[in-house]
Amino acid sequence: MKTLKPTHISVLSQELIEGLSLTEGDVVLDATINGGGHSLEVSSAIGKDGTIIGIDLDSDALKEAKDRLKGVDPRVFFKEGNYRDFVQILDSINIPCFDKAIFDLGMSSRQLDVAGRGFSFRSDEPLIMTYSKNPPKDALTARDIVNTWDEENIAAILKWYGGERYAKRIAHSIVTNRKERAIETTKDLVDIIEEATPSSIKRSRIHPATKTFQALRVTVNDEIEGLRETLTKIPNRITPGGRIAVISFQSSEDRVVKHIFREWKKDRLGTPLTKKPMVPSRKESESNPRSRSAKLRIFHFKKDI
Ligand SMILES: C[S@@+](CC[C@H](N)C(=O)[O-])C[C@H]1O[C@@H](n2cnc3c(N)ncnc32)[C@H](O)[C@@H]1O
């Protein structure tokens, strides 16, 4: 099998594959397939009778996944779209349900490093931040938020989705600066954030723009509501005895997953297999620093749901 050098290193792969207890012939929904790293591992476990349905909003990611998974044994469907629409996507290919599901949330390293859509505060790019390369004309962008939202709303998302301690100061600085000229690029925004944060923060290991950028990305892609809405539909389409694995990278996402798994347990749909989320080993965090904040939760549905 041809293996291409990945632009994104999959996280918690071994834990994910073991936790899903994959068997030959499984139908697997990879809701965030990206370059296909996890799916490649899945493919050897489910064999020629298995099926993978890979979804991603990013067409470049799907192209990479197609190359990477060329020649694997299972049948693979690549679908450009939002995982929020997974029911329609399954219906479009006449697959009523799946045995296992993977949600590996957020952005990929390729999006951060080379997509040019404003995910990185380390390069100078237009402030877009949509996962989709070709979003609809009226799609919300990070540029819209920083140039048109009022100060209170900007401060609120920085606090909620970024956990930014200086949310109010940064929001005030954004609104003051945009009166002079529009905030167009990541560099414009980073300068404003740096001006608004105390110098002790500027010396810390974490870049002062980290939390603001996270909050904007989460808001642009409506990630928290999208995740909640999607997870609530999973029990209708998962096979009895099925499993779902979710990898999150920030506390607002992990809270949603934890809460929904708890609801499913209360409704006697099954059991969470991870009382506490699994996190990367020291070895993995050292070899792939971007994995550091990852948290994996797995839920096992009962055979008689
Ligand atoms: C962390 S990467 C997944 C990595 C993948 N598991 C692997 O091993 O290569 C997250 C991917 O999810 C995609 N994504 C994020 N939100 C999405 C959504 N709502 N619907 C579909 N894809 C989404 C991003 O475009 C990105 O490619």
Image (cartoon, grey):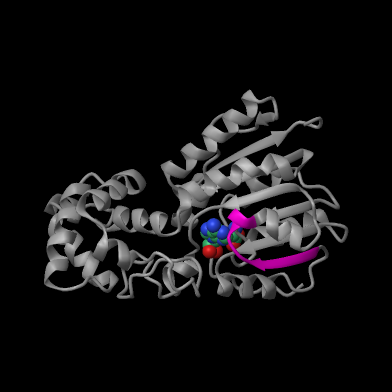
Whether residue 76 is in magenta: the answer is yes
Which quarter of the rendered image does ligand 1 occupy? bottom right
Q: In the image, residue 115 lies at what x, y percent?
A: 45, 74
281 or 57, which lies in front?
A: 57
155 or 281, which lies in front?
A: 155
Image quarter of the C terminus: top right
Judged from this view, the residue extending furthest toward the front is 138
Question: Does residue 179 appear left or right of residue 277 in this picture?
Answer: left
What residue sits 75% from the left and 58% below the top?
A: 91
Q: How many marks?
A: 0
Q: In the image, residue 41 lies at what x, y percent?
A: 71, 58
What residue sits 47% from the left and 44% below the top?
A: 253
Q: In the displayed structure, would residue 288 be above or below residue 115? A: above
Image quarter of the N terminus: bottom right
Question: Does residue 291 appear left or right of residue 144 in this picture?
Answer: right
What residue sits 41% from the left and 54% below the top?
A: 218
59 or 21, which lies in front?
A: 59
Q: Which residues are magenta?
A: 75-85
Whether residue 305 is in magenta: the answer is no
Please say whether residue 266 is visible from this viewpoint. yes
Q: In the image, residue 245 lies at what x, y percent?
A: 63, 44
Q: In the displayed structure, would residue 19 be above or below residue 202? A: above
Q: In the displayed structure, would residue 247 be above or below residue 268? A: below
Please say whether residue 283 is visible from this viewpoint. no
Residue 148 lies in quadrant: bottom left
Residue 113 lies in quadrant: bottom left
What residue sits 18% from the left and 48% below the top?
A: 168
